[in-house]
Image (tube, rainbow, N blue to C red):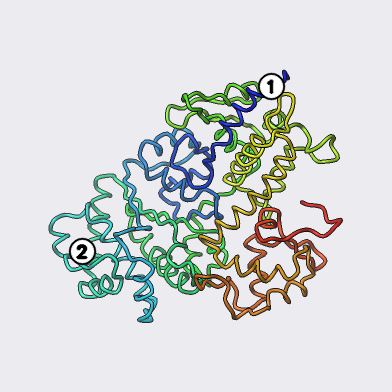
Amino acid sequence: MASLTNERRANYLQALSLRAAHAETTDPRDIFPVSEHLRALEAEVVLIIGDRGSGKTQLKKALTTPNIRGALLRHARSIRVPGESTWLQGWPLESGGPDLRGWRELLSTNPGRDDLIAIWLAYLLRTMKPHLSPDEVEKTTELHQAHAADARSVLAAYQKIGVTVTTVLDALDERMLQQQRWLFVAYDELDTIFHENWQAMGAVIRGLVSFWAAYARRWKRLRPKVFLRSDFYKHHRDVAGADVAKLAGNRVELQWSDKNLYGALLKHILNKTDANGDRPLQSYFARTVTSISDPVLGEIPVLGKAEEAKPFVNRLISEYMGANRGKGASFRWILDHLRDGNGRALPRSLVQLIELAAEIERDQPRASGAHLLHHVSIRNALDRLSAEYVLQAQTHEFSWLDGLGRRLSKDREVPWKRRELIRLLSQDFAGGWSDTGARPPGADPEELLENLVELGVLRARGNELLDVPDLYLHGLNLRRKGGVAKK
């Protein structure tokens, strides 16, 4: 490989360091089509399960955008796609639904299971208003006139008109069947209902799941798509409710193989544009990557297996994370150090790692030859990624991580023996864990420990040892004991 001049390397790094991985992008050029994920298009699929950062929201937005959905269909192998369809938003409803206070006020009345099912049925009818006949709207006027933010008023209006809501939706479903059309209702970001109260959030989500567990069999052409975080699904009896098992047979799990992780990274890089709208990185990596072009999705890398990404990684960094193989092969090292405690790595973290490394390399050049990144830049980027990953989690789904970090900081060196970790978690367990009042998922330190392992924040290593994966380590202000190799 010919060496790069400093100027050319700087230009490539500038293109690579434009950070686009902080949020779920709607740019179709950043969407890597995974056949298994696209099964979410099938009418029978109700649940779409994925970890934080696995692409749930990106997939939902893609499926609800007609031109992107059409582009994805071209790459959906063996997917049984329904005919003419319209996608609607069941949640979040923004100004069309309750905010945090609205949910709190509803729950303050101690609603029963039937009420928590009814509230979702009521908001579904309101969502369907554009597809109702004038006569059907008139029959349910009281429900439509209730203020969207006031969940109690919406529920009260529903209770007044009762079975009329069901008969109207039954009639709509029959029309869709006769017209050979489909109405899909997508529910995403359910964890935004309550950040600070696991039990309250569980009550509302159980109502939604119970509602569709009952009605998904009733209606043929009104179909739900419930995007649910993996931890909610695994704790279904506590959070999503036992009814989730009735929907679980028709589900898609957004898991990422090593091949698809590198595919997603490659797609992101190949479609990077500079200030002139050119794709300098596409030409730079052309000899290491095979791709096809799509008018909407842009360049799509073609990988038969993960190992086919090795030439790209070797050109980006080098074959090893140091002078020789003793430091680890870059191709394996990158993904292994991004995995959570359950061994899962996600594309957002991978893309963000490379973008952060490009920023570091641009400011402190170390790479030589034909490579863009030095292994030291990658290692330093991992610490920055961990800090940003934990901060983002604290700001959104896992605000209790702040309290977890404070308790673990009493003994910062990992791994710990189980009894040592229980002791750390027990410190002021009933006290505050976050500024929002959010508490961690566990009624006591033992249950919390098990849930932290299940969430991937901790990793069980055997012999009663508990470790923290690199994805969380630096962000929680922890470090490894001497002689304990990073994994």
Q: Nearer the viewer, residue 132 or 449?
A: 449
- Locate residue 415: give its quadrant: bottom right
For disc 2, the marked residue is 144
Q: Residue at x 58, y 71 (%)?
A: 440
Amino acid under label 2?
Answer: His
Query: Is 105 on the left-hand or right-hand side of 484?
Result: left
Q: Residue 56 at what x, y percent from top left? A: 49, 50
Above or below 316: residue 190: below
Above or below 41: residue 116: below
Q: Residues within 10 Å of mark 2 (few under 14, many from 20)?
A: many
Q: Nearer the viewer, residue 116 or 438?
A: 438
Whole-angstrom CA distance, mark 2 to mark 1, is 64 Å
Q: Residue 36 at what x, y percent from top left? A: 54, 44
Q: Residues within 10 Å of mark 1 (few under 14, many from 20)?
A: some
For disc 1, the marked residue is 4
Dot placed on the residue nearer the N-terminal end, 2 or 1: 1
- Locate residue 26: give its quadrant: top left
Query: Is 245 on the left-hand or right-hand side of 91?
Result: right
Q: Residue at x 28, y 70 (%)?
A: 150
Tell me the quarter of the image containing the N terminus: top right
